[in-house]
Amino acid sequence: MSRRPVAQINLAAIGHNLQRVQQLAPASKVLAVLKANAYGHGLVRVAQALSEADAFAVARIDEALALRTAGVVKPIVLLEGFYEAAELPILLANNLQTVVHNELQLVALEQAELDGQLKVWLKIDTGMHRLGISPEQFNEFYRRLWQCPAVQPGIRLMSHFSCADLPGAVKTSEQLTLFQQLCSDKAEQQSLANSAAIIHVPESHGDWVRPGLILHGISPFTHQQGWQHQLRPVMRLSSRLIAMRKIKQGETVGYGANWQAEQDTWIGVIAIGYGDGYPRHAVSGTPVWLAGREVQLVGRVSMDMITVDLGQQPVETIGAEAVLWGPELAIERIAKYADTIPYELLCNITPRVDYQYITV
């Protein structure tokens, strides 16, 4: 029996979810987003499981180089682009593609003396106001990139939605309209749709879609779960029941004594806590799947342990498996109880957790 929590990663589920993306956007190529260690699932193993994707996207150059070192040969796009001109020869040597989103990057490309040309994605800020050139800069950047000797012909055009996870948001239609107006007379390939837009904004699919969260079986919408979009959860986070104790009505549990038993009951202790990545701010009542039934978290989350209410007549024994999220218990539910989003839960898994990969 493992003494460590286990994050079981179902690689077959990743393949299924990619196929679902391809069904939703059959005319588009898939740029699979693998940033932040593939959303906490393991960068290299997930990339290997996504062999049918057309290309990969990461945030930073170290992630791209890790994929190349592991033997991944598919195109890789740096979503944040390069930070300084000294990185350009590294991009060229490793066949990495870069997003351009500001003047400094454009000037660096214009001044570069490279032995070859780089594939460039030009990012336009249509309303996210994070990365990207302004609409007013678009024509100038487009012209200068076409004239730049360091840039391959055929730049790609992209933007990013700010509210696609809010179905029916006016902001989404405004961004789509602006992007289409700017690019309507351009023959270059275009990319706008993230996970939420792949599902709910089919008119935005374009030449490339950029799925991230949905590849891992999770809904990008607050009030929905992955299964509602025919997705399969990829990560199953589990641990073990390591102690049981009976407490009396009125007794408290955990730091701060902020949970008090309303009746005599049994408390179970499960070996996982915020030191493993379980959310510290999960409140009493957060569900845990324990040996085939749902029980509730009580008291504060500790660094190494959580406590659950087993009721007056528990059927579990020490060593019973507890699932914190997975096929039995949707991570979207846990995120609500912790007042956060599934992205954060996935990315916060720590090295104390044992990763296991399965293919069923």
Image (spheres, rainbow, N blue to C red):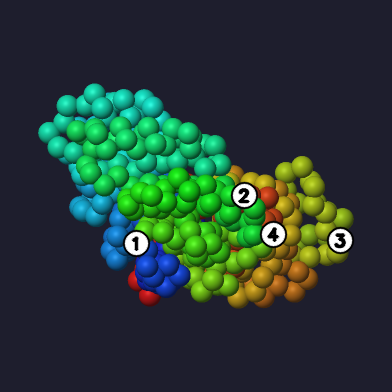
Horizontally, residue 173 falls left or right of residue 265, namely: left
Q: Which residue is mark 4?
A: 286
Sooner in the amino-acid sequence: mark 1 or mark 2: 1
Q: Which mark is residue 171?
A: 2
Query: Residue furthest toward the left?
Result: 115
Q: Which mark is residue 262?
A: 3
Q: Which residue is mark 1?
A: 29
Q: Is residue 321 visible?
A: no
Horizontally, residue 69 falls left or right of residue 317, namely: left
Q: Position of residue 257 (x, y in %)?
A: 79, 46
Q: Quadrant of the C terminus?
A: bottom left
User: Rounded to the nearest whole Å, what is the CA distance between mark 2 and mark 3?
Assistant: 48 Å
Secondary structure, mark 3, is: loop
The correct choice, above or below, for 168 with respect to 163 in the image is below
Secondary structure, mark 4, is: loop
User: Rounded to the nearest whole Å, what is the CA distance between mark 2 and mark 4?
Assistant: 33 Å
Tell us which disc is closer to us: 3 or 1: 1
Tell us which disc is closer to us: 1 or 4: 1
The reply to whether the C-beta atoms of the residues labelled 3 and 1 are less than 8 Å apart is: no
Mark 1: give few (<14), some (14-19) or many (20+) Cα within 10 Å: some
Under mark 1, the amino acid is Lys
Nearest the eye: 292 or 77: 77
